[in-house]
Image (cartoon, rainbow, N blue to C red):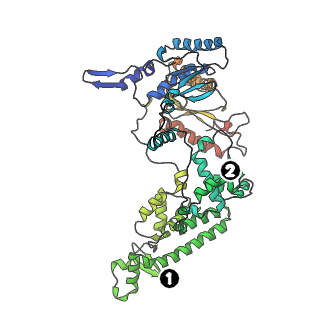
Amino acid sequence: MDLLWGFYQVRLEENSIPYMAFATPDGLFEYLVTAMGISSSPSSFNRPRCIFSDYNTFCQTYFDDLFAFTESDSIDNHLDALEKVLDRCAQEHLFIKIEKCVFCQPEIPCLGDYIGRDGIRMDPKKAESIRDWPIPENKRELQSFLGTCVRTREGIAYGGRKLSKPEMVYPTREKELLAALHAMRTWKVYLLDCPSYLNTDHRTLESILQQQTCSQRLARWLNEHCFSHSLSESNIVADAISRRKDWNDSSARSISLSSLIHAISEASASLTPEETLLHIRSHVTDIEQACRDGYHNDQYLGSNMKDLRDSTAGNTRRLRRFSIKNDLLYFQLRPDATWRLCVPDSPGLGTAILFEEHDSPARGHPGHGKTLLLLLEKYYWKRMTQSVGNYIASCESCQRNKSVRGKPSGLLHPLEIPSNRWEKISMDFLSPLPLTKAGYDPFLVVVDRLTKRAHFVATTSKATAASKAQLFFYSYQRLHGLPLSIIPKFTAALWRSIMQLQGTHLQLSTAFKSSTDGQSETTIKFVGEYLPHFVNPHQDNWDGLLPLA
């Protein structure tokens, strides 16, 4: 069944009508119903599907389409289900376009296909032009027909990529696992709801889940995937593609200093702190030697070293900023500043230094400003600020683990300041927490938007919408009465109906914008920092600390 002009059957709230106004040469007009072309219209129009939520066993909806079905072959059961759906449409004043309805059929059209008890099949009308194609009479007509069939057949998923320079130094087993990981990430949608098995010709992957220790990289990659071994002859297609002669480029196998340091850093994750410090100390020695070897290739620093060694060059202002010690060139910006090592423009040398001052465990991936300050204390090279910015912007670990601190797009629309206390509140839940002896795992936060005072009420994650509403009444309403507005982060139908019956206005917070309910977020952050200081070792007494918080 198809709703007649579905968007126009959803009435707008009175306070939303002025926002739908549009000007024409004949005057100003306002939509009283949901308009087509508005970005939020489809999601708003799809919400009334909750009207049929109690009929899920025999009725489903997709925007303006209603599907009534039964599992049994009895026509009486089907007519009973259809009658219930039509009665609900009459109660909710939903009008149906009879010309587009199909009743009592073994299969029905849906989104270009036919759905029935036997499964899904293509609409015969869509395949009619291919089925009735005239017999080709020459080579060109045959090529046209075959090309059309290949174009419209179901595609076979494929994918691949080349290894980057840091990945070229991975051990063979990790390279094999990286290929499998790339495939799992690419076709993740097919692996979410079922166990997956990897068929590979690399036997050592079978024991990767049984080994006692592994590197940080392998620990990140492993995610309960099962591996089974197959002989190389049965994996011919993958081997042939991955072993193409034109891909065996010797230049891509050259190992730069930065790639080697990244590999050593990953491998040193399982070493003791003393051994790790020895590795870092050896890198510093390599950097100094690399600077000595690179000065003759750097035109600017090389000319300065030549002038310093030439007694006839004179003591100019430029040369007074440079000094040579142990065949290393140092730079001093001011007389009271420290001498900094000059780094030549050599391939990979700047990246190696940036790795030491940014990626090492002693530094902990600081931001642009802190990394630049660390470098300015010891090193000098041209365009250092730009080099630091480019390196941090391309740091995979920073992009994956750090939060975005930039201002969100758009203008900030602050909420209206309440005139009295406890008349406008915000609500949120903090979960999950360790299970307490009383069986509580989350707790409810109710914050007064004027005085910033808060109530903390422990509850359970299995609580239904009705239980949460009852919890709100006992913890808030009996103390302060009904509020004028509530900013929650949940939009259950029961909450909306309770607020409507009580005459309370429900203001929904914007999705993925925590500043809408910033007071609840800030209060939860405070409680989250307060409780760990006082909970017992088992962390099961936090519910008794809520009144003190």
User: x%, y% of residue 505?
Assistant: 48, 23
User: x%, y% of residue 522?
Assistant: 53, 40
Mark 1, Cα crowd under 10 Å, few <14 / some 14-19 / many 20+, is: few
Quickly name the residue at label 2. 199
| Residue at the extreme left | 25
Mark in front: 2 vs 1: 2
Q: Which tag, 2 or 1, sits closer to the chain's start?
A: 2
Q: Are marks 2 and 1 in contact (CB under 8 Å)?
A: no
Mark 2 falls on what kind of element? strand
The amino acid on which the numbered mark 2 sits, given as a three-letter code, is Asn
Mark 2, Cα crowd under 10 Å, few <14 / some 14-19 / many 20+, is: some
Mark 1 falls on what kind of element? loop
**Foreground of the two, 135 or 246:** 135
User: x%, y% of residue 432?
Assistant: 64, 38
Identify which residue is drawn at 42% across, 63% down.
Answer: 385
Quickly name the residue at label 1. 326
Q: Is residue 357 above or below residue 512?
A: below
